[in-house]
Amino acid sequence: MTRRAVMVGNVQIGGGTPIVVQSMTSTDTRDVAATVSQIERLQCAGCEIVRVAVPDREAAKDLRNIKEQIAIPLVADIHFDHRLALAAIEAGVDKLRLNPGTITDKEKITEVVRAAKGAEIPIRVGANSGSLAKKFRDAHGHPSAEGMVQSALAEIRLLEEMDFTDIVVSLKGTDVLMTIAAYRQLASEANYPLHIGITEAGTPWEGAIRSAVGLGILLEEELGDTLRVSLTGDPVEEVRVAYEILRSLRLCQRGITYRVCPTCGRTRIDLATIAQRVQEGLADVEEPLTVALMGCVVNGIGEAGEADVGFVGGDGNGTIYVAGEPVHHDVPEGELASRIVQTVQDVLKKAS
Ligand code: SF4
C-alpha cells in the first residue's frame, strides 16, 4: 500500500518516494553557530531533514536564525509547552514533532494544529515508549505494541477531527521486536507516512546493530518512508549508519559500498588500517560506487574484478584494479591507502 505523501519543505516523505534520511542535532539549540555547523556536517553526510530540540523560548527564538543559515528542512522537536510549538511555527520551521503524550490539553493542541495548518507544515505525532501515557500502558504499567498503536491512532484521530491530515507517524520503542510489531499493526490501520526508528538504541556500536536489525526488517516489509538512526554521540554517525542500512537493502544509491575481507592467516598486509584510511579519505563521496579491499588472491581476484575499484593484497604490497583490470601493480603497503583513494577520485573524475 502506498502511503500518503507529506511535504517537509521541499522534501517529500511517503507517496512512493525513496526513503528520506533524518537526524537530530546534539548541540544546544541556543548556540546557533554550533548548531548550524553541525547541521552543515549532517547535510554533507547526506542528511535530508534535520530536527532540533526546542526546550525553551530562547531556543524557539533562535530557530529563525538557524533556518536562515541552513539548506535542508528544519523540524522543531516540542514537548510539554505548546507555546514553543507556536513560536517555532512563527519562526518558519518546516515541520513539528509534537508529542500529545507530553502536551495533553486538547485546547492547546488545537491551537498548535490551527497554526500548523495556517503555515501549511506537517506534524509528526506518535508514541515513544519512554513517554507513553499511562492509559496506553499494559496491565503491568509497561509499554506494549498494542498500546503504542492505540496511542498513535488516538493522536491521529484528534488531528483528523480538526481536519488536519498533514501527518507523519512514528512508533519508536527501545525494544526492537515491540517496535516492529507496532509498525506492522499501525500500517494496517492508517496510511500516513511512517517515520521509523529504534529509540535510545545506544552507543554507535550497539545502536547501529539494533537499528539495522529493526529498521532492516521494517524496510524489507516496506514499512518506512523516513528514518532516523538514534545513536549516542556525533549525529553524523547516525546518517552514515542509515545509508549503510539502506544500501544493504538496495534502497539507495548514495555513496560507496565497501567489500572488505575479514583477513586471515594468509594476510600479509595491515588491511584494517588500510581500509580505515581509505574510508576516511572517501567519506564525502556521494556517487554510487563499489570498492573491494581484499587481503589476498583467494577471494580477492573475484571481488576486485567485480568492483568499480578493487585492491588485492600481496606480501607487503598490493595490486589496484579498475573495472576488473589491474592498473597499479606491487604498490608498497605504506602507499596503498592513498593510491586507492586517488584511483577512486580519478574514476569519479573520468565519469563526471
Ligand atoms: S581474501 Fe585472502 S586474506 Fe582475505 S579472508 Fe580470504 S583468504 Fe584470507
Image: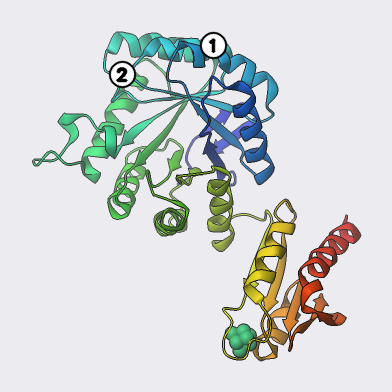
Q: Position of residue 116 (x, y in %)?
A: 48, 15
Q: Nearer the viewer, residue 192 or 270?
A: 270
Disc 2 designates what residue?
103
Q: Nearer the viewer, residue 140 or 267?
A: 267
Task: Rate crowding at label 2 as few (under 14), some (14 to 19) or many (20 or more) other CA atoms within 10 Å.
Answer: some
Q: Position of residue 279 (x, y in %)?
A: 68, 61
The residue that appears at 57% across and 86% down in the rendered structure is 264
- Judged left or right of residue 142, residue 73 is right
User: Which amino acid does the dot numbered 1 rest on?
Assistant: Lys
Q: Counting residues from the N terminus, which is met first, the one under dot 2 or under dot 1?
A: 1
Disc 1 designates what residue?
61
Q: Nearer the viewer, mark 2 or mark 1?
A: 1
Residue 80 vertical position relative to residue 342 in the rendered view, above or below: above
- Judged left or right of residue 185, residue 64 is right
- Judged left or right of residue 33, residue 132 is left
Q: Position of residue 78 (x, y in %)?
A: 41, 22
Whether the residue carrying mark 1 lies under 8 Å from ligand 1 is answered with no
